[in-house]
Image: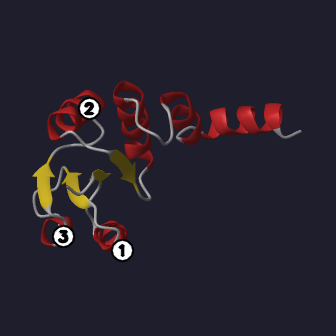
């Protein structure tokens, strides 16, 4: 059975990501708060879910038994990715890294501490 990836977002910028995942034989589930998202025409499944609601995303991801989760060009989705990765023990950005990446001040602090 194919692995399942959950993609948070579904506008035009996500079409390439969806196509790439499908080319790698992933079952692609896309979620977006826009019910008319273009992703519904490309993903194997599309669901109208606001991916900024990280607990809803987690419950959905758990129900769908996903193998991976990602987003693309979405600061809002990064936190949900980290939360789900932590809760489901998936590889990828954890919650701490997601918090750092979605906050300019935390990113600067992290880089100053670890790079300089």
User: Could you say whether the residue bearing mark 2 is in a helix, strand or loop?
Assistant: helix
- CA gap between label 1 and label 2 equals 24 Å
- Residue that mark 2 sits on: 58
Residue in view at x 13 percent, y 65 percent: 40
Quarter of the image for the C terminus: give it: top right
Left or right: 1 in relation to 73: left
Neighbourhood count class around disc 2 (C-alpha, 10 Å): few under 14, some 14–19, many 20 upward: many
- Which numbered disc flags the more N-terminal residue, 2 or 3? 3
Q: Residue 47, how many percent across, how many down?
A: 12, 51
Q: Residue 28, how many percent across, how many down?
A: 23, 59
- Residue that mark 3 sits on: 38
Image quarter of residue 43: bottom left
Q: Residue 62, how many percent across, how many down?
A: 21, 33
Left or right: 61 in relation to 13: left
- CA gap between label 2 and label 3 equals 23 Å
The label on residue 16 is 1
User: Could you say whether the residue bearing mark 1 is in a helix, strand or loop?
Assistant: helix
Snapshot colouring: secondary structure
């Amino acid at each position: 059975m194919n692995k399942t990836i959950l993609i948070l977002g579904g506008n035009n910028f996500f079409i390439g990501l969806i196509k790439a995942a499908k080319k790698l034989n992933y079952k692609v589930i896309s979620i977006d708060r826009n019910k008319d998202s273009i992703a519904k025409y490309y993903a194997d499944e599309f669901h109208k879910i606001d991916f900024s609601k990280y607990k809803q995303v987690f419950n959905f991801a758990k129900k769908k038994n996903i193998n991976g989760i990602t987003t693309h060009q979405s600061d809002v989705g990064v936190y949900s990715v980290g939360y789900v990765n932590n809760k489901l023990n998936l590889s990828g950005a954890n919650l701490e890294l997601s918090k750092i990446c979605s906050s300019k001040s935390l990113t600067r602090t992290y880089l100053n501490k670890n790079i300089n």
